[in-house]
Amino acid sequence: MKKISRRDMLGQASRLGTTLAVGLPLVTSAAETPTGKTPATTKPKLKVVVTGGHPGDPEYGCGGTIARYADLGHEIVLLYLNKGEWTNKPGHDPGPIRVTEAGKACEILKARPAFAGQIDGKAIIDQDHYQEFRHLLEAEKPNVVFTHWPIDNHADHRAMSLLVYDAWLRMNKKFALYYYEVSTGEDTVQFAPTHYVNISEVIQRKRSACYAHASQSPDKFYALQETVTRMRGLESGYKQAEGYIRHVQSPDFTLPMS
């Protein structure tokens, strides 16, 4: 029988104390033992909200992490700033197509889609929209929120980042706040991760979720994002990884690490 060290005992006690202190529900899981039995263990169940400027952003930037959270039994919401309905072609609205694609991607990742009601390419940041977005997050009651890194070349990405940040401040920094990267070099710039998530075992699911957005040139954008995850994997010692920056004042909820 494996001996339990004093450090292990203290770690388990600390994790249980944290769960009870923040009032999180518990997820029951099982781990096989040398005897072949699978005793139940409990972990805190999280409400995870991943925000993005457009359908596809959360999947490309955080798809592997989303899959790992879902596999652990947590509740995932992908909150898009808009439905991708803006277009340069008069009389053609891609919004319904992109909403359908988002639904397919969320089904693959075991997540739920939600929309903030803004227009692609015409994001508005003012007091009314700050308040409206905060009400959306308050209704979701998240434990963890992921959003765009604010130094980004796309205005919709920057807008979403600011909306989340304002809501976080006004909600008294109750949820953990992490920033992610997407199309690094083209959109996200000056991104230096503080945390990494190993996505090596869920790469195919992430790819499938990204390719569900068939109208958005997935061959081009997935190749770019995979270059990023391979680089983050080299940095962190995995085959592929997704990198994040945790706000220094954020609660440090556990990422789905290996």
Image: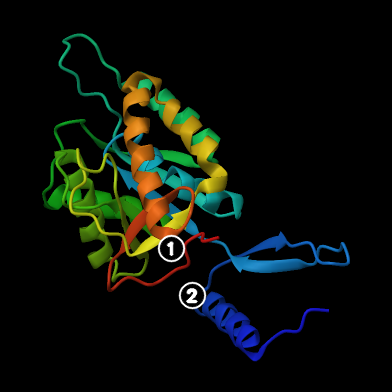
**Residue 4 sits above or below residue 156 on the image:** below
**CB atoms at circles 1 and 2 under 8 Å apart?**
yes
Pointer 1 local density, CA inside 10 Å: few below 14, some 14–19, many at least 20: some
Question: How far from the left and from the top, in percent, is residue 37?
Answer: 86, 63
SS for dot 2? helix
Residue drawn at x 24%, y 49% as measured from the top left: 132
Measuring 48% from the left and 41% from the top, which residue is drawn there?
Answer: 112
Number of the label disc, if any, that sits on residue 22:
2
Q: Earlier in the sequence, mark 1 or mark 2?
A: 2
Extreme residue toward the right, this view: 35
**Which numbered marker is on residue 143?**
1
- Residue 122, x across and y down, in percent: 14, 33
Q: Is residue 120 above or below residue 154?
A: above
Q: What's under tag 2, amino acid-wise?
A: Val
Which residue is depicted at the point 36% across and 55% down? Answer: 243
Q: Nearer the viewer, residue 169 or 129?
A: 169
